[in-house]
Image (tube, rainbow, N blue to C red):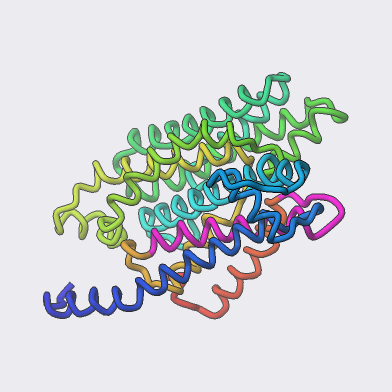
């Protein structure tokens, strides 16, 4: 806080020199990963056929690519790729926001019960035999309702630290919602409903359509907008309420806005793909190791890395074995050892 304006300007200039080439390189890397995800799978697509399909669909160029290849690329893989990019970016941005707001490196997007609430809503929809759109709607409403309940408890208990109150209320509400999920699993038909419930709770992109993505995209953009536009204030929020207010930040207004944005994108993501853990916890730490703790750089880096990470995990899930592995299993297998390494090494990614 004691740096001179000249030092700040010098740091900003240094970041532009390093950051712009890094951003360009990251963009090309993400593009290459997208092309690989469209080409690799049980039905491999050659680069020539992939370019032909994309050129025909995007630019109207003539193409001799077989219809089967075009169907695989445009109707099967493209929705999964787009969903992986959107959901991965959203969950990692929400995780980075929550970690800054609650000043805790162990915080993830489900800290306030949004994943448990969305899970209960979706499980209830499956148990009642509702159509997919209704299940997704219940999941979205359940996630928002859970966080609203947690925040209501936080407002009711004013005499304690607001951050600690929200965390403890989230743990308690999440436990109750988890008990509701377990009860519905016990009551569900073990031959039809229970497998569907279990698979949904582990997360998957296998049934995502472009229509699903279009339906949640407005909510994603609405939730991400305050996180991106106010990311520079996150640096002050991470100092603590008293310090932030001393620097002119009205925490009582800003915190609900940021919590609402992070909750909205998380609920929208979970309603479409099911519960995919560890992304919002691990990816912000990776971004912090690469670009530092400044949220002006950390949040954009988390968006890009989250999109790339989930796209890579989904590619492995549908290509590594004879059956598709649920995403929640793979993200835990990758995320937990990495987090233990961070913890053991005492790296600044946990700071």
Residue at image position (58%, 45%) is: 83
For residue 160, say whether it is visible: no
**Residue 21 x/y as whole percent:** 39, 74
> Would you say residue 142 sits in the magenta stretch?
no
> Would you say residue 303 sits in the magenta stretch?
yes
Side of 146 where 131 appears, left or right: right
Q: Is residue 264 above or below residue 52?
A: above
Residue at image position (73%, 58%) is: 40
Q: Is residue 1 above or below residue 161?
A: below
The stretch in magenta equals: 298-326
Side of 67 where 57 appears, left or right: left
Side of 249 where 76 appears, left or right: right
- Residue nearest the observer in this picture, 133 or 45: 45
For residue 155, say whether it is visible: yes
Q: Quadrant of residue 3?
A: bottom left
Quadrant where the C terminus is found in the figure: bottom left
Q: Is residue 36 above or below residue 340?
A: above
């Amino acid at each position: 806080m004691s740096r001179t304006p000249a030092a700040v300007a010098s740091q900003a200039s240094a970041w532009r020199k390093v950051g712009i080439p890094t951003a360009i390189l990251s963009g090309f890397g993400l593009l290459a990963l997208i092309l690989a995800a469209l080409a690799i799978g049980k039905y491999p697509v050659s680069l020539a056929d992939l370019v032909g399909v994309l050129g025909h669909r995007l630019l109207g160029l003539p193409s001799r690519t077989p219809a089967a290849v075009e169907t695989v690329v445009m109707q099967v893989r493209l929705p999964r790729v787009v969903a992986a990019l959107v959901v991965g970016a959203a969950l990692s941005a929400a995780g980075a926001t929550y970690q800054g707001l609650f000043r805790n490196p162990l915080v993830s997007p489900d800290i306030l019960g949004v994943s448990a609430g969305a899970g209960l809503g979706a499980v209830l929809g499956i148990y009642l035999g509702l159509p997919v759109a209704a299940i997704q709607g219940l999941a979205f409403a359940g996630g928002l309702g859970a966080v609203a309940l947690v925040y209501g408890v936080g407002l009711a208990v004013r005499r304690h630290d607001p951050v600690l109150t929200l965390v403890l209320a989230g743990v308690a509400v999440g436990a109750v919602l988890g008990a509701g999920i377990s009860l519905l699993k016990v009551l569900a038909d073990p031959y039809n409903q229970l497998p569907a419930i279990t698979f949904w709770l582990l997360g998957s992109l296998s049934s995502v359509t472009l229509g699903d993505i279009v339906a949640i995209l407005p909510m994603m953009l609405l939730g991400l907008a305050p996180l991106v536009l106010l990311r520079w204030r996150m640096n002050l929020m991470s100092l603590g309420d008293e310090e932030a207010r001393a620097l002119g930040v009205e925490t009582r207004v800003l915190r609900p806005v940021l919590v609402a944005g992070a909750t909205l994108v998380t609920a929208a993501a979970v309603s479409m793909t099911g519960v995919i853990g560890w992304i919002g916890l691990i990816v912000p730490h990776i971004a912090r190791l690469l670009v530092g703790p400044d949220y002006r750089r950390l949040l954009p880096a988390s968006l890009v890395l989250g999109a790339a990470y989930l796209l890579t995990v989904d590619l492995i899930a549908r290509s590594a074995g004879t059956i598709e592995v649920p995403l929640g299993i793979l993200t835990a297998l990758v995320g937990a050892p990495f987090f233990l390494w961070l913890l053991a090494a005492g790296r600044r990614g946990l700071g």
